[in-house]
Every structure is written in C-alpha cells, then in structure tokens.
Amino acid sequence: MIPARLAAGLSWLSGLGFGLPALYGIAYFARTGDVWQFMGFPTYGHGPFEKIGIPTTVPLLVGFGAVCGAEVIAGSLLWRGRRSGKKLALALLPFEVAYWIGFALPLGPLLGAGRTVAVICFRSNEPSRTT
C-alpha cells in the first residue's frame, strides 16, 4: 500500500502545485494577454512551446489545467488503492511530459518520475476479475 500512497501524494503535489497557479495564470492571460510572472519568472510561457511556434493561449493553458485536475483525480484513486488510478496516472504521463517540457517546468519531470516508479510498484487492492 505504501507505493500507492506515495504515488497519490506525488500526484496531488504535482496536480495542485501546478494546477492552482495555472488557474491564476489562465485568468491573468485572459485578462492581459501576457504570461503571468512569478518571482520574475514566466509561469506558463516563453519556453520551448513558443520556440517551436506554439504560442501561449487560453486553450493551451486550460488544457494544462485539465491535465492537472485529472492528476488530482488519479491521486485520489491511487490513495484508495484503485487500479483505475494506476491506469489514469500512466495515461496522463505523455500529456504531462509535453506540458512540463513545453512550459519549461523543471520540477514536473522529477515529480512525474517518482510517481511513475511508485505507480509501477503499486499493487491494487481490488480483487482480480476472472471472466
């Protein structure tokens, strides 16, 4: 059960840690048309996405917020030992990686790697279904 709880905690940390600021970043960008700066650093913009021609837009930021929200849901499922949490966490990984790299978020890959190792080690407490 420890890997599931660890994976859940890392999912919540990543989902809320990036998702809550993303909500403010969405509102700020929609209001001003500029990327929100936190402590002098751009939060969700001016990174590799823009360097390859993908400008920061409200839909791009909303997509990232949705991925973060789904990560919080995955964390809740993992905490309860649900196999669906493991599947959701693994399914979200490619999208998370794209956003982490595209927005140049250095902590994302670290949290994601830790969560992925914990998810792989996780054994569901649900009974096996035989058909």
Image (tube, rainbow, N blue to C red):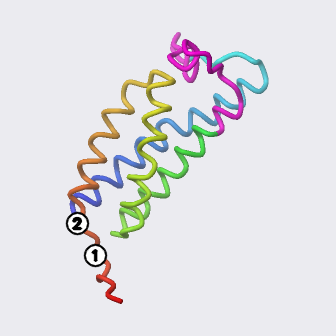
Horizontally, is 9 left or right of 55 in the view? left
Marks 1/2: CA–CA distance: 8 Å
Q: Indicate which label's residue lies in the foreground, 1 or 2.
A: 1
Residue tagged 1: 125
Magenta stretch bounds: 38-62
Residue tagged 2: 1
Q: Position of residue 129 (x, y in %)?
A: 33, 84
Q: Are marks 1 and 2 in contact (CB under 8 Å)?
A: yes
- Asked which secondary structure carries label 2, the reply is loop
Q: Position of residue 109 (x, y in %)?
A: 35, 33
Q: Give the residue furthest to the front.
A: 131
Q: Position of residue 5 (x, y in %)?
A: 29, 59
Give the residue type that dot 2 points to: Met
Q: Residues within 10 Å of mark 1 (few under 14, many from 20)?
A: few
At x 24% / y 67%, what residue is drawn?
A: 123
Q: Which mark is residue 50?
A: none
Instruction: Report the quarter where the C terminus lies.
Output: bottom left
Magenta stretch holds residue 54: yes
Instruction: Report the quarter where the N terminus lies.
Output: bottom left
